[in-house]
Image (cartoon, helix red, strand yellow):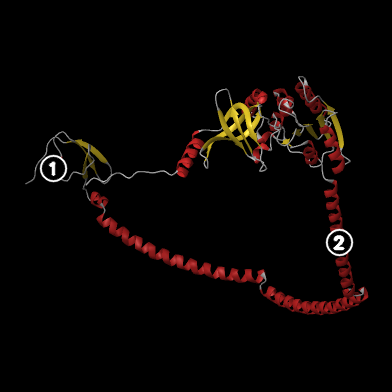
């Protein structure tokens, strides 16, 4: 029996959720240009509107955390550029965009130019963290590069006066908006670098649109900031405004006021610290003095009059002197006894007596040695005579003296004992008791 396959039946909630997932994961953040319409701003602070062109429209939502960052007030009919996430509003199953950022369409080209320059300079290393310089803890002189008539210089000077009025400030006036502003800013940074008058520079201006702040997005300004050896803080516009100068600067402050606070010590805070340190120092001095006073009092109690030490030392010297004299006498007596003993022993060991005694001993030994030698010579003489007689009895010379001779073969010097050792014509040497002569064998007889 064949069973029917199970059907995967969706409910509406599941369908909308999966469609939303597909839309959100299938599309990256997109940039979209269109005309604002049907704008609604309820009490929640979120914005709901449509973006449309000549042939279509799409519903959009921009939540309060995002729309409060905008620098303009949107109106129906306004042409805008939006950065958005593609999604679906599940409860109604409506396709919509969640807007992350919104700007007037006229800023679109500038925004694209900004991103291109930002990527270029980042690749060149102008934003690298390792190139950033540290700010001085307590600067002696601050240089402010800004418009002398703008609100930024007023905020900076007011803050510096409130926090640390003794700080010296040098104002480098520049134009911060217009066609020549970028070149003016770059030259002023280079001038401050050349003069070396300040410990830190503050580049600032008030808020404005992207176009108003564009002078701070020029490459010539970025290069001037990067090449400056004096630490530089940028404070351009408001917290939401970011410029190329902010990325290149050593430190970025959200506002001119924040920059002035960053670069200046807080007099009130320092005064509180000094007061606390003064109290600690005074208390430390008091504690030290009390400890020293207590130590002096303790030492004063233990001090003994020098006369007591003198008398005690004098008595000790007398005692030691008496012991020393007694010790010397005892030592002299012992040394005298030892000297007498050594003198007696020395007399007994006089070399003259020793030499005479040894001479007598040597003479006696010499006489004994002479007698022994004479006796030994007599014994050896008798032994020699006996041995000579024995040798003469067996000596070949004795045999030769009785008329005998011995024969040597000339070629081999071998004594001939057998007639077979020679042949006719061989030369032989015949040795007698007195002399020898050579002979040639002419004939031989073999004895049976």
Q: Nearer the viewer, residue 205 or 123?
A: 205
> What numbered label is drawn on residue 343?
none
Which percent across, then down, holds residue 345? 68, 75
Distance (Cα) linking label 2 and label 1: 142 Å
Secondary structure beneath dot 1 equals helix
Cβ atoms at labels 2 and 1 below 8 Å apart:
no
For residue 70, what is the image quadrant?
top right
Secondary structure beneath dot 2 equals helix
> What numbered label is drawn on residue 419?
1
Question: Which residue extends farthest left?
Answer: 448
For disc 2, the neighbor class at 10 Å (few under 14, some 14 to 19, many from 20) is few
Please tell me which of labels 2 and 1 falls first in the chain: 2
Q: Residue visible at 86% across and 61% down?
A: 283
Q: Which residue is mark 2?
A: 283
Which percent across, then down, holds residue 128? 65, 33
Q: Nearer the viewer, residue 414 or 93?
A: 93
């Amino acid at each position: 029996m064949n069973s029917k396959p199970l059907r995967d039946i969706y409910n509406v909630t599941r369908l909308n959720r999966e469609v939303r997932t597909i839309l959100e994961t299938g599309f990256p953040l997109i940039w979209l240009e269109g005309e604002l319409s049907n704008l609604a701003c309820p009490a929640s602070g979120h914005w709901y509107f449509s973006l449309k062109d000549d042939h279509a429209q799409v519903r959009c939502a921009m939540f309060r955390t995002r729309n409060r960052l905008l620098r303009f007030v949107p109106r129906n009919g306004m042409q805008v550029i939006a950065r958005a996430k593609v999604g679906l509003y599940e409860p109604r199953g409506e396709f919509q965009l969640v807007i992350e950022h919104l700007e007037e369409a006229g800023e679109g080209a500038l925004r694209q130019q900004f991103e291109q320059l930002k990527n270029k300079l980042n690749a060149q290393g102008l934003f690298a963290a390792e190139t950033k310089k540290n700010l001085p803890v307590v600067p002696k002189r601050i240089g402010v590069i800004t418009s002398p008539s703008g609100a930024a210089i007023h905020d900076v000077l007011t803050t510096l006066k409130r926090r640390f009025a003794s700080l010296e400030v040098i104002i480098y006036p520049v134009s911060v908006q217009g066609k020549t502003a970028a070149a003016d800013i770059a030259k002023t940074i280079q001038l401050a670098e050349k003069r070396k008058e300040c410990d830190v520079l503050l580049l600032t201006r008030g808020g404005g649109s992207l176009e108003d702040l564009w002078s701070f997005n020029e490459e010539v300004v970025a290069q001037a900031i990067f090449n400056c050896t004096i630490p530089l803080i940028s404070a351009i516009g408001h917290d939401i405004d970011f410029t190329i100068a902010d990325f290149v600067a050593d430190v970025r402050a959200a506002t001119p006021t924040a920059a002035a606070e960053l670069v200046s010590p807080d007099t009130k805070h320092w005064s509180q610290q000094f007061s606390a340190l003064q109290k600690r120092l005074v208390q430390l001095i008091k504690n030290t003095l009390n400890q020293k006073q207590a130590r002096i009092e303790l030492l004063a109690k233990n001090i003994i009059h020098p006369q007591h030490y003198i008398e005690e030392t004098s008595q000790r010297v007398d005692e030691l002197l008496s012991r020393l004299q007694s010790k010397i006498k005892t030592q002299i007596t012992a040394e005298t006894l030892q000297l007498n003993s050594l003198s007696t022993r020395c007399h007994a060991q006089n070399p003259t007596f020793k030499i005479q005694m040894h001479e007598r001993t040597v003479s006696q030994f010499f006489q004994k040695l002479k007698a022994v030698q004479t006796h030994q010579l007599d014994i050896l003489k008798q032994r020699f005579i006996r041995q000579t007689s024995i040798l003469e009895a067996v000596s070949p010379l004795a045999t030769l003296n009785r008329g005998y001779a011995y024969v040597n073969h000339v070629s081999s010097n071998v004594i001939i004992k057998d007639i077979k050792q020679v042949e006719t014509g061989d030369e032989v040497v015949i040795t007698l008791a007195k002399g020898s002569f050579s002979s040639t064998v002419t004939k031989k007889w073999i004895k049976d």
